[in-house]
Image (cartoon, rainbow, N blue to C red):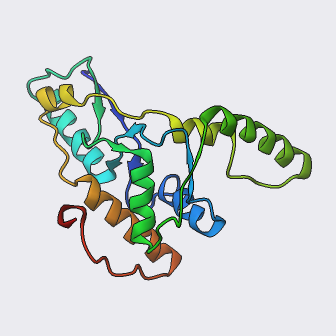
């Protein structure tokens, strides 16, 4: 039996509990002004329906030409976005703009995360800031998806702007809140 490996990037979409919710939670916690590191690290967040499309394309390939057999493919939207800009886009959908910005060096944030983890353990509380969250906020999550395009014919149908919007709409629905009307899109700025 022929197989291939699909390596999806960070996912967003309906039912997401790991990406949009914690970024949205930063609003209530007053954490949106803080930028850990330079905030320019690229992420290529992929809408979940695009990942499903890639699976279908891989299965079709393996049942016909088999050029994907034994190969590994990075599956993403191929629209890298700075992590800070991704967060700003989510917050904007919920009607929030950080009132100011404070940059925190990555090493200082990592140390603060360590202290926060220790205090959490000591007092039995929870924290947003951890060494892992600092690593996530500062890491690059982008790789070339060219191979998937060439061999599988994969191209994202749902772009990053629509993916963020649909993810935020779904999360707002689950929270039982209505999103404020968007006055303009990125293209109209």
Q: Position of residue 58 (x, y in %)?
A: 21, 33
Q: Quadrant of the N terminus?
A: top left
Q: Is residue 98 above or below residue 176?
A: above
Question: Does residue 63 appear in the picture of this structure?
Answer: no
Residue at screen point 39% across, 70% down = 93
| Direction from residue 36 to residue 124 in the image, left or right | right
Question: Does residue 189 appear in the picture of this structure?
Answer: yes
Q: Nearer the viewer, residue 185 or 52?
A: 185
Residue at screen point 38% across, 63% down = 167
Q: Quadrant of the C terminus?
A: bottom left
Q: Is residue 39 above or below residue 168?
A: above
| Direction from residue 126 to residue 68 in the image, left or right | left
Residue at screen point 51% across, 64% down = 98
State the residue lying farthest toward the right: 122
| Direction from residue 22 to residue 3 in the image, left or right | left
Q: Position of residue 18 (x, y in %)?
A: 52, 52
């Amino acid at each position: 039996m022929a197989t291939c490996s699909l390596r999806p990037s960070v996912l967003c979409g309906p039912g997401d509990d790991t990406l949009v919710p914690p970024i949205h939670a930063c609003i209530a916690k007053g954490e949106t002004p803080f930028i850990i590191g330079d905030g320019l690290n690229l992420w290529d967040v992929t809408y979940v329906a695009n990942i499903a499309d890639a699976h279908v394309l891989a299965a079709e390939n393996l049942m016909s030409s088999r050029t994907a057999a034994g190969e590994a493919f990075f599956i993403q939207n191929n629209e890298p976005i700075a992590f800070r800009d991704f967060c700003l886009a989510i917050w904007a959908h919920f009607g929030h703009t950080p009132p100011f910005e404070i940059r925190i060096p990555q090493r200082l944030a990592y140390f603060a995360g360590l202290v926060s983890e220790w205090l959490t353990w000591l007092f039995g509380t929870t924290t947003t800031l951890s060494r892992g969250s600092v690593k996530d906020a500062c890491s690059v999550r982008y790789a070339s998806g060219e191979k998937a395009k060439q061999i599988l014919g994969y191209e994202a149908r749902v772009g990053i702007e629509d993916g963020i919007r649909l993810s935020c709409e779904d999360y707002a629905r689950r929270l039982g809140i209505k999103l404020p009307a968007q006055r303009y899109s990125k293209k109209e700025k």
